[in-house]
Amino acid sequence: MMKNKSETGNTGSNRRIDGDYVWYMSYGSNMFEKRFASYIDGGEFRGGGSRHEACEDKSAPRAVRACEIPYDMYFRNSSCSWDGGGVSFLDIMKPGRAKGVAYLITREQFSHVACQENGGCPPEFSRGWYDTVVSLGIMDGYEVLTITNGETENYNVPSEAYLETLRAGLREHFPEMTEKEICDYLSRCIR
């Protein structure tokens, strides 16, 4: 279960109360809200990344929370959208610690984001870079889901544009972190 960094510090009830909504736990470039919005609203994020189709339901997240994820983040693959640099994944094979931002969105929106992140293919088809949906438990009565890939190879250093997007997301949601702490955190994710 992830540690919630909400203003109250309360993770709330673990009882599921609404199956229509889920927390989408982002840990890479989608931690930056403007970047995440490009998946819901459609278009291209000007800081980098590819063009995305708009979600049928363009409603904003019902809530947004900074959280700790119980797995390490690392960078792998070579993304043309990010100047050939690596992008973020979670190592779900062992315990760790990563920063994350949870967005309370509809299941339809989550499926749309997961499909867009996975090159247009739903993760359940086990193809693409983000072909694994991981349940991180329940927070405030809603299931917490993220996407990653079960493989931990093809490591690659991220591009400066990608790192700047991650830094922007960390600044936005973890204001207590200093610039040095942000840089140290991201450096630890490079393998």
Image: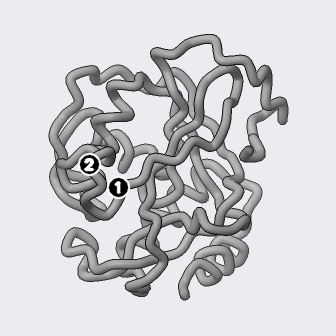
Identity of the residue drawn at 38% across and 45% down: 36
Mark 2 or mark 1: whose residue is earlier in sequence? 2
The residue that mark 1 highlights is 131
Side (left or right) of 75 relative to 54: right
Residue 63: image location, x then y, percent: 57, 26
Side (left or right) of 8 relative to 63: right
Amino acid at pointer 1:
Asp
Identity of the residue drawn at 32% across and 48% down: 123
Quarter of the image containing the N terminus? Answer: top right
Residue 161: image location, x then y, percent: 35, 73
Quarter of the image containing the C terminus? Answer: bottom right
- Mark 2 touching mark 1, by CB under 8 A? yes
Nearer-the-camera pick, 146 or 63: 146
Identity of the residue drawn at 43% across and 85% down: 155
Q: Secondary structure at mark 2?
A: helix
Q: Nearer the viewer, mark 2 or mark 1?
A: 2
Nearer-the-camera pick, 140 or 9: 140
**Count of labels in the image:** 2
Residue 86 versus residue 107 in the image, above or below: below
User: Most extreme residue toward the top, as rendered?
Assistant: 17
Residue 91 location, quadrant: bottom right
The residue that mark 2 highlights is 125
Please tell me how crowded label 2 is: few (under 14), some (14-19), or many (20+) other residues with Cα within 10 Å: few
**What is the number of the mark on residue 84?**
none
Please tell me how crowded label 1 is: few (under 14), some (14-19), or many (20+) other residues with Cα within 10 Å: many
Side (left or right) of 99 relative to 11: left
Residue 157 location, quadrant: bottom left
Identity of the residue drawn at 52% across and 40% down: 145
Residue 23: image location, x then y, percent: 54, 32
Residue 141 location, quadrant: top right
For the residues labelled 2 and 1, the Cα–Cα distance comes to 7 Å
Amino acid at pointer 2:
Phe
